[in-house]
Image (cartoon, rainbow, N blue to C red):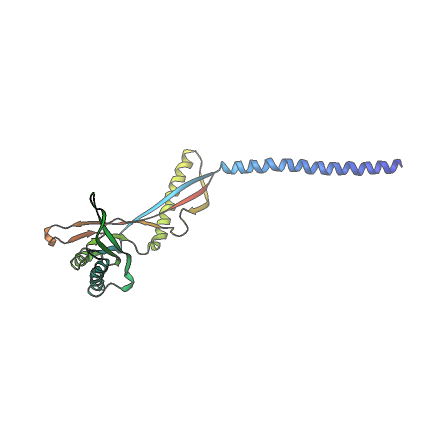
Amino acid sequence: MNAWSKKLGAVMLAGSLMIGGMALSGAFQGPEKAYAAEEAQRNIVNVTGKGELSIKPDVVYLSIGVSTSAATAEEAQKTNGAKITKITTLLKTTWGIADKDVQSTQFSVQPNYSYSDKDGQQVKGYIAQHTLKVTYRDLTKVGALLDAASNAGANNIGNAQFAIEDPSAFEAQVIEKAMTNADVKAGAIAKAAKRSLGQVITVTQNDDGNNPVIYMENAAMSKAAADTAGGTSVEPGEVKVSTQLTVMYELK
């Protein structure tokens, strides 16, 4: 019986040592991992690189509309419809604008109210409005096109919006500029910290997932001087194409 007791005690002691060793090993693994994570955090730098290009636009979006007042809604709509049909025909035939580039964006017929202390609010008549969004690509003739539309009856012409029809064509260029900008920033930070810059760890493009490259319109519309017979002068200017990258670098 004593021999069996001694063997059982030895087995129990070995089991205890194994369990204790595992627990001790686990206790050391936690701090080691935490220390490694902290060490990694001390050896990285995050910067945002910005890339931008100034490019001549290749398309303009024009808002051309007609507003007509009449005593009845039917009369306002009929008169306005005739004017907008005339303008649409002009755009498509005389100016060669494709059907897909002439789009109705707003149409309404609403009462026009007047107010007096004696009678209160009264319907004075009706106003019909119809607006077209016109996409045009010959930027040298924008002013002449607007003048022609005005002569045809357009009396509600909005600002010209110049743009790049396919900004994604410049995506690679602005990404390269943004990455170069990030390299310069990260290098300056590393130098100031008396460290050297290592490899790139991660790169994230800051966008909504649909428009990695954005453009900002820059248009100007004004009346020209007498040398152009008082016609409308439209200056396309330049369009800004840009993107941003968040870059994580290793610090040595």
Could you tell me residue 72's position as x and y percent?
22, 57
Q: Position of residue 94 (x, y in %)?
A: 19, 64
- Quick check: can you spot residue 25? yes
Q: Position of residue 178 (x, y in %)?
A: 37, 46
In the rendered image, which quarter contains the N terminus? Answer: top right
Compared to 1, does 128 lie above or below?
below
Residue drawn 32% across the image and 47% down it = 52
Question: Residue farthest to the bottom?
Answer: 93
140 sits to left or right of 39: left
Residue under the image location 68 percent in, 37 percent down: 23
* Residue at 40% in and 33% down: 192
Position of residue 67 measured from the top left corner of the image (x, y, whole percent): 21, 55
Q: Is residue 252 visible?
A: no
Q: Is 32 on the left or on the right of 71, as rendered?
A: right
Viewer-nearest residue: 161 or 86: 86
The image quadrant that residue 129 belongs to is bottom left
**In-image side of 200 versus 81 (left or right):** right
Residue lying at the far top in this picture: please name it.
193
The single residue placed furthest to the right in the displayed view is 1
Front residue of 96/63: it is 63
Total count of labels: 0
Residue appearing at x 43%, y 40% in the figure: 46
For residue 20, which quarter of the picture? top right
